[in-house]
Amino acid sequence: MQNPSKGFIIVASNNVNFYVYAVNLIESIKDWYPEAQITLVTEERFIDDRADEADNIIFCDNHYRAKLWGMSQSPYDITMYVDADMDCEHEDIAKVWDELGDRDLVFHELTPEREKFYAIREFRYKGRMEKYTLCGGVCLYRSSNPLVMEFMAEWFELYNKQLNNIWQPEGFDNRQWNEDLKVFDQTTLWWLTEQEDKYKDLKIGIFHDDIRWNYFTQYQYENLHSIEGKPPILRHYSGSLHKDRLLV
């Protein structure tokens, strides 16, 4: 494909705080990468003049995980999804498209040394311990590929079924499923990438020096840094922001 369109997707739903974080993120990306094309997916009730920073706006409902639906709505050929509660800190954001290569989806990795900062990583499936390995906080994907877009749409649809007790595959521990697993879109992501045969041909990889692309603020407590000694590109404030009360 010659000159594929490239852009960012940022989703803010359910709580106006996410909208505030999203517009701040858009501004920070534009500060380092003025040419960036950014689509904001948000609720119409949140919109004010701050949304003018976005190049495109798509309206969603108030679903807590509208991010999954928003990822399936990308107007670009190549898309970088970024969680709203992040901030861009480095000019290398403009090089994100080089990370895709010949792959279809690229993620941040969940690793043992970062494990203490995750709500859950291990779970039992068919009598053996499995682990989440992919983090959905950022995702670079080839949205011109119909199978990738089918993957994104099913991620949202299956998560809804999982959350509403409509879908639970055999093999999961019932107690752990009900107490932990069913509320996480990571569970759905694991299922689609590890158990669904129709997506086996998708080329899925990890960002090079991936900690730079999704640097959780908590990582600094354990002195976790880039393998190349470079600063974060995207800093993630998950767990350190007010998501349950309104900002003034």
Image (tube, rainbow, N blue to C red):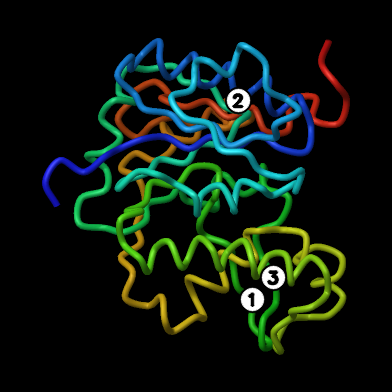
Residue at 74%, 79% (x, y): give it: 167
* Quarter of the figure with the C terminus: top right
Q: Sequence-wise, which precedes: disc 1 or disc 2?
A: 2
Q: Sequence-wise, which precedes: disc 3 or disc 2?
A: 2
Would you identify the image quadrant in which residue 104 lies? bottom left
Residue at 64%, 83% (x, y): give it: 128
Q: Which residue is mark 1?
A: 129
Q: Which residue is mark 3?
A: 123
Residue at 30%, 56% (x, y): give it: 144
Residue at 82%, 16% (x, y): give it: 247
**Pointer 1 local density, CA inside 10 Å: few below 14, some 14–19, many at least 20:** few
Residue 222 point in image, percent of width and height: 59, 31
Number of residue marks? 3
- In the rendered structure, the answer to whether residue 134 lies left or right of residue 98 reads right
| Distance from Cα at disc 1 to Cα at disc 2 | 36 Å
| Distance from Cα at disc 3 to Cα at disc 2 | 32 Å
Seen in the picture, residue 123 relative to 243 is either above or below; the reply is: below
Seen in the picture, residue 35 relative to 9 is either above or below; the reply is: above
- In the rendered structure, the answer to whether residue 237 lies left or right of residue 113 reads right
- In the rendered structure, the answer to whether residue 206 lies left or right of residue 72 reads left
Depth order, front residue of 14/121 = 14
Q: Amino acid at mark 3?
A: Phe
Circles 3, 1 touching at the beta carbon (< 8 Å): yes
Depth order, front residue of 220/67 = 67
Q: Amino acid at mark 1?
A: Met
Q: Sequence-wise, which precedes: disc 3 or disc 1?
A: 3
Q: Which residue is mark 2?
A: 22
Residue 214 point in image, percent of width and height: 49, 35
Would you identify the image quadrant in which residue 170 lies? bottom right
Nearer mark to the viewer, of 1 and 2: 2
